[in-house]
Image (cartoon, grey):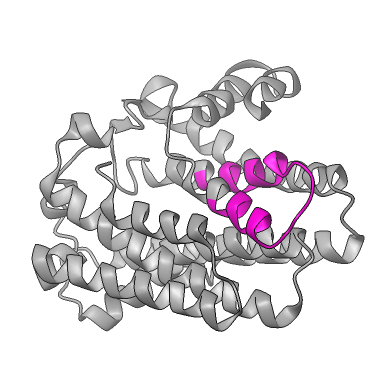
Amino acid sequence: MVAEEVKSEYAGEIGEAIAYGLSAPGKRFRPALMAAVHRELGGKGTVSWLGAAVEVVHTYSLMHDDLPCMDDDDIRRGRQTAHRKFSVATATEAAMRMVPLAARVLARGADMILCSRDELGRMGKELFVAAGASGMVGGQMMDLEAEGRSLTVEELEQVHGAKTGALVAASAVIGSIAAGADDAVVVHVKSFGEELGLAFQIADDILDATASSDTLGKTAGKDARQQKATFATILGITDARARAEECVGRALDNLREGGIDSKLLSALGRFVIEREY
Protein backbone atom coordinates (compact mmCIF):
# COMPACT_ATOMS: atom_id res chain seq x y z
CA MET A 1 0.00 0.00 0.00
CA VAL A 2 2.37 2.73 1.24
CA ALA A 3 5.41 0.96 -0.19
CA GLU A 4 4.08 1.16 -3.73
CA GLU A 5 3.30 4.87 -3.46
CA VAL A 6 6.77 5.54 -2.06
CA LYS A 7 8.44 4.33 -5.26
CA SER A 8 6.71 7.03 -7.27
CA GLU A 9 7.41 9.77 -4.70
CA TYR A 10 11.09 9.10 -4.03
CA ALA A 11 13.30 8.59 -7.06
CA GLY A 12 16.20 6.15 -7.23
CA GLU A 13 17.67 4.03 -4.48
CA ILE A 14 16.16 6.03 -1.61
CA GLY A 15 12.64 5.17 -2.74
CA GLU A 16 13.64 1.58 -3.41
CA ALA A 17 15.15 1.27 0.07
CA ILE A 18 12.06 2.73 1.77
CA ALA A 19 9.78 0.42 -0.20
CA TYR A 20 12.09 -2.51 0.54
CA GLY A 21 11.84 -1.91 4.28
CA LEU A 22 8.09 -1.39 4.30
CA SER A 23 7.29 -4.40 2.13
CA ALA A 24 9.33 -6.88 4.18
CA PRO A 25 7.29 -9.65 5.83
CA GLY A 26 6.64 -9.16 9.52
CA LYS A 27 4.17 -9.56 12.38
CA ARG A 28 2.71 -6.05 12.00
CA PHE A 29 1.84 -6.31 15.67
CA ARG A 30 1.65 -2.57 16.34
CA PRO A 31 -0.85 -1.79 13.55
CA ALA A 32 -2.85 -4.89 14.52
CA LEU A 33 -3.00 -3.67 18.11
CA MET A 34 -4.07 -0.20 17.01
CA ALA A 35 -6.84 -1.62 14.80
CA ALA A 36 -8.00 -4.03 17.50
CA VAL A 37 -8.31 -1.27 20.12
CA HIS A 38 -10.19 0.91 17.62
CA ARG A 39 -12.62 -1.89 16.85
CA GLU A 40 -13.18 -2.95 20.46
CA LEU A 41 -13.95 0.63 21.51
CA GLY A 42 -16.62 0.95 18.83
CA GLY A 43 -14.61 2.83 16.22
CA LYS A 44 -15.99 3.12 12.70
CA GLY A 45 -14.28 3.12 9.33
CA THR A 46 -11.04 1.74 7.97
CA VAL A 47 -7.92 2.52 10.01
CA SER A 48 -5.36 0.77 7.81
CA TRP A 49 -3.54 4.04 7.03
CA LEU A 50 -3.29 4.94 10.71
CA GLY A 51 -1.78 1.52 11.28
CA ALA A 52 0.56 2.07 8.36
CA ALA A 53 1.84 5.29 9.98
CA VAL A 54 2.82 3.35 13.10
CA GLU A 55 4.48 0.67 10.97
CA VAL A 56 6.47 3.29 9.02
CA VAL A 57 7.93 4.55 12.30
CA HIS A 58 8.66 1.03 13.51
CA THR A 59 10.32 0.06 10.22
CA TYR A 60 12.49 3.19 10.22
CA SER A 61 13.69 2.25 13.69
CA LEU A 62 14.62 -1.25 12.55
CA MET A 63 16.60 0.09 9.58
CA HIS A 64 18.64 2.33 11.88
CA ASP A 65 18.92 -0.35 14.57
CA ASP A 66 20.55 -2.72 12.06
CA LEU A 67 23.26 -0.27 10.96
CA PRO A 68 26.93 -1.09 11.64
CA CYS A 69 27.18 1.73 14.20
CA MET A 70 24.33 0.19 16.19
CA ASP A 71 23.51 -3.54 16.22
CA ASP A 72 25.33 -4.28 12.94
CA ASP A 73 23.01 -6.99 11.65
CA ASP A 74 22.78 -8.73 8.27
CA ILE A 75 19.27 -10.20 8.47
CA ARG A 76 15.92 -8.61 9.23
CA ARG A 77 12.50 -10.13 8.68
CA GLY A 78 14.02 -13.06 6.84
CA ARG A 79 16.08 -11.15 4.30
CA GLN A 80 19.06 -8.84 3.94
CA THR A 81 19.00 -5.71 6.05
CA ALA A 82 18.59 -2.48 4.09
CA HIS A 83 22.21 -1.38 4.45
CA ARG A 84 23.39 -4.76 3.11
CA LYS A 85 20.93 -4.66 0.21
CA PHE A 86 21.80 -1.06 -0.71
CA SER A 87 24.45 0.80 1.33
CA VAL A 88 24.88 2.30 4.78
CA ALA A 89 24.35 5.83 3.42
CA THR A 90 21.20 4.86 1.51
CA ALA A 91 19.68 2.95 4.44
CA THR A 92 20.45 5.81 6.83
CA GLU A 93 18.89 8.47 4.63
CA ALA A 94 15.92 6.30 3.67
CA ALA A 95 15.09 5.71 7.33
CA MET A 96 15.36 9.44 8.11
CA ARG A 97 12.92 10.26 5.31
CA MET A 98 10.43 7.81 6.77
CA VAL A 99 9.77 10.11 9.73
CA PRO A 100 7.99 12.84 7.73
CA LEU A 101 6.46 10.08 5.59
CA ALA A 102 4.83 8.67 8.75
CA ALA A 103 3.32 12.09 9.51
CA ARG A 104 1.77 12.29 6.03
CA VAL A 105 0.43 8.76 6.25
CA LEU A 106 -1.07 9.49 9.68
CA ALA A 107 -2.80 12.63 8.36
CA ARG A 108 -4.22 10.68 5.43
CA GLY A 109 -5.48 7.97 7.76
CA ALA A 110 -7.16 10.56 9.99
CA ASP A 111 -8.89 12.12 6.97
CA MET A 112 -10.22 8.74 5.90
CA ILE A 113 -12.20 8.33 9.11
CA LEU A 114 -13.09 12.02 9.43
CA CYS A 115 -11.03 12.73 12.55
CA SER A 116 -11.00 16.30 13.81
CA ARG A 117 -7.84 18.42 13.77
CA ASP A 118 -7.67 18.01 17.54
CA GLU A 119 -7.80 14.22 17.25
CA LEU A 120 -5.13 14.23 14.54
CA GLY A 121 -2.94 16.44 16.74
CA ARG A 122 -3.34 14.11 19.70
CA MET A 123 -2.53 11.05 17.59
CA GLY A 124 0.50 12.77 16.09
CA LYS A 125 1.76 13.76 19.52
CA GLU A 126 1.40 10.20 20.80
CA LEU A 127 3.23 8.74 17.81
CA PHE A 128 6.17 11.13 17.66
CA VAL A 129 6.72 11.52 21.40
CA ALA A 130 6.81 7.71 21.60
CA ALA A 131 9.31 7.65 18.74
CA GLY A 132 11.54 10.39 20.13
CA ALA A 133 14.15 11.02 22.81
CA SER A 134 11.86 10.12 25.71
CA GLY A 135 10.70 6.98 23.92
CA MET A 136 12.09 4.73 21.21
CA VAL A 137 15.18 6.74 20.19
CA GLY A 138 16.14 7.39 23.80
CA GLY A 139 15.61 3.73 24.62
CA GLN A 140 17.82 2.66 21.73
CA MET A 141 20.56 4.93 23.04
CA MET A 142 20.24 3.52 26.56
CA ASP A 143 20.37 0.02 25.09
CA LEU A 144 23.63 0.76 23.28
CA GLU A 145 25.16 2.34 26.36
CA ALA A 146 24.22 -0.73 28.42
CA GLU A 147 26.26 -3.17 26.31
CA GLY A 148 28.82 -4.94 28.47
CA ARG A 149 27.28 -3.59 31.69
CA SER A 150 25.29 -5.30 34.42
CA LEU A 151 21.79 -3.92 34.82
CA THR A 152 19.10 -4.53 37.40
CA VAL A 153 15.68 -5.70 36.23
CA GLU A 154 14.31 -2.25 37.04
CA GLU A 155 16.97 -0.56 34.89
CA LEU A 156 16.27 -2.96 32.03
CA GLU A 157 12.55 -2.22 32.30
CA GLN A 158 13.37 1.48 31.99
CA VAL A 159 15.39 0.83 28.81
CA HIS A 160 12.72 -1.26 27.13
CA GLY A 161 9.78 0.69 28.45
CA ALA A 162 11.18 3.42 26.21
CA LYS A 163 12.69 1.42 23.34
CA THR A 164 9.81 -1.02 22.81
CA GLY A 165 6.97 -0.18 25.16
CA ALA A 166 6.46 3.45 24.17
CA LEU A 167 5.56 2.72 20.54
CA VAL A 168 3.38 -0.25 21.49
CA ALA A 169 1.52 1.95 23.97
CA ALA A 170 1.18 4.73 21.39
CA SER A 171 -0.33 2.24 18.93
CA ALA A 172 -3.04 1.35 21.44
CA VAL A 173 -3.67 5.00 22.32
CA ILE A 174 -3.98 6.03 18.66
CA GLY A 175 -6.62 3.33 18.22
CA SER A 176 -8.56 4.65 21.21
CA ILE A 177 -8.39 8.29 20.06
CA ALA A 178 -9.51 7.30 16.57
CA ALA A 179 -12.48 5.50 18.15
CA GLY A 180 -13.49 8.67 20.03
CA ALA A 181 -12.79 7.25 23.50
CA ASP A 182 -12.95 9.63 26.44
CA ASP A 183 -9.82 10.62 28.33
CA ALA A 184 -10.39 8.23 31.24
CA VAL A 185 -10.55 5.24 28.89
CA VAL A 186 -7.45 6.42 27.00
CA VAL A 187 -5.48 6.43 30.26
CA HIS A 188 -6.33 2.77 30.88
CA VAL A 189 -5.58 1.87 27.27
CA LYS A 190 -2.16 3.49 27.54
CA SER A 191 -1.34 1.53 30.71
CA PHE A 192 -2.49 -1.63 28.93
CA GLY A 193 -0.16 -0.83 26.02
CA GLU A 194 2.82 -0.11 28.27
CA GLU A 195 2.52 -3.46 30.04
CA LEU A 196 1.97 -5.26 26.74
CA GLY A 197 5.05 -3.60 25.26
CA LEU A 198 7.18 -4.79 28.15
CA ALA A 199 5.82 -8.33 27.79
CA PHE A 200 6.62 -8.16 24.06
CA GLN A 201 10.26 -7.28 24.80
CA ILE A 202 10.63 -10.01 27.41
CA ALA A 203 9.30 -12.52 24.87
CA ASP A 204 11.79 -11.17 22.30
CA ASP A 205 14.66 -11.69 24.75
CA ILE A 206 13.55 -15.26 25.42
CA LEU A 207 13.24 -16.02 21.71
CA ASP A 208 16.69 -14.56 21.00
CA ALA A 209 18.11 -17.05 23.48
CA THR A 210 16.05 -20.09 22.50
CA ALA A 211 14.93 -19.89 18.85
CA SER A 212 16.83 -20.25 15.56
CA SER A 213 17.63 -17.50 13.07
CA ASP A 214 15.42 -19.21 10.48
CA THR A 215 12.45 -19.12 12.83
CA LEU A 216 13.03 -15.54 13.95
CA GLY A 217 13.92 -14.08 10.53
CA LYS A 218 16.85 -12.30 12.20
CA THR A 219 20.14 -13.29 13.80
CA ALA A 220 19.47 -15.37 16.90
CA GLY A 221 21.82 -15.25 19.90
CA LYS A 222 23.06 -11.79 19.00
CA ASP A 223 22.21 -10.31 22.41
CA ALA A 224 24.62 -12.68 24.14
CA ARG A 225 27.41 -12.06 21.63
CA GLN A 226 27.05 -8.31 22.10
CA GLN A 227 27.02 -8.74 25.89
CA LYS A 228 23.62 -7.13 26.23
CA ALA A 229 21.69 -7.35 29.44
CA THR A 230 18.36 -9.02 28.67
CA PHE A 231 15.46 -10.35 30.70
CA ALA A 232 16.56 -13.86 29.74
CA THR A 233 20.10 -13.36 31.06
CA ILE A 234 19.15 -11.46 34.21
CA LEU A 235 16.15 -13.57 35.26
CA GLY A 236 16.71 -16.85 33.46
CA ILE A 237 14.24 -18.27 30.94
CA THR A 238 11.70 -19.63 33.44
CA ASP A 239 11.49 -16.47 35.54
CA ALA A 240 11.48 -14.28 32.43
CA ARG A 241 8.43 -16.19 31.14
CA ALA A 242 6.74 -15.68 34.49
CA ARG A 243 7.52 -11.96 34.36
CA ALA A 244 5.98 -11.71 30.87
CA GLU A 245 2.84 -13.46 32.16
CA GLU A 246 2.63 -10.93 34.98
CA CYS A 247 2.89 -8.05 32.51
CA VAL A 248 0.06 -9.42 30.38
CA GLY A 249 -2.04 -9.97 33.50
CA ARG A 250 -1.54 -6.35 34.55
CA ALA A 251 -2.25 -5.19 31.00
CA LEU A 252 -5.63 -6.92 30.96
CA ASP A 253 -6.39 -5.69 34.48
CA ASN A 254 -5.92 -2.13 33.21
CA LEU A 255 -8.47 -2.77 30.46
CA ARG A 256 -11.01 -4.15 32.91
CA GLU A 257 -10.49 -1.16 35.21
CA GLY A 258 -11.36 1.01 32.22
CA GLY A 259 -14.55 -0.96 31.60
CA ILE A 260 -13.13 -2.82 28.59
CA ASP A 261 -13.73 -6.58 28.45
CA SER A 262 -12.37 -7.76 25.12
CA LYS A 263 -11.65 -11.30 23.98
CA LEU A 264 -9.75 -9.91 20.99
CA LEU A 265 -7.37 -7.81 23.10
CA SER A 266 -6.96 -10.67 25.54
CA ALA A 267 -6.00 -12.93 22.62
CA LEU A 268 -3.44 -10.36 21.45
CA GLY A 269 -1.97 -10.40 24.94
CA ARG A 270 -1.61 -14.18 24.77
CA PHE A 271 -0.04 -13.92 21.31
CA VAL A 272 2.63 -11.57 22.64
CA ILE A 273 4.04 -14.16 25.04
CA GLU A 274 3.15 -17.40 23.21
CA ARG A 275 4.48 -16.50 19.76
CA GLU A 276 7.35 -18.45 18.25
CA TYR A 277 8.92 -15.60 16.24
Residue 92 at x, y = what percent? 50, 38
| Magenta stretch holds residue 201 | no
Residue 27 at x, y = what percent? 43, 39
Q: Magenta region's main secondary structure?
A: helix
Q: Nearer the viewer, residue 218 or 91?
A: 218
In which quadrant of the rendered view does residue 181 lie?
bottom right
**Quadrant location, the N terminus:** top right
Indicate left or right for 136 with 65 as reference: right
Indicate left or right for 194 with 97 as reference: left
Indicate left or right for 40 with 147 as reference: right
Q: Nearer the viewer, residue 39 or 160?
A: 39
Report the number of discs: 0
Q: Is residue 132 above or below residue 182?
A: above
Q: Is residue 79 above or below residue 153?
A: above
Residue 185 at x, y = what percent? 67, 77
- The residue stretch that appears in magenta: 33-58
In which quadrant of the rendered view does residue 41 lie?
bottom right
Q: Nearer the viewer, residue 236 or 254?
A: 254
Q: Is residue 41 above or below residue 45?
A: below
Look at 72% across and 23% down and name the residue there.
5
Q: Is residue 161 above or below residue 120?
A: below
Q: Is residue 255 visible?
A: yes
In which quadrant of the rendered view does residue 252 lie?
bottom left
Indicate left or right for 81 with 156 as reference: right
**Quadrant location, the C terminus:** top left
Residue 117 at x, y = what percent? 90, 60
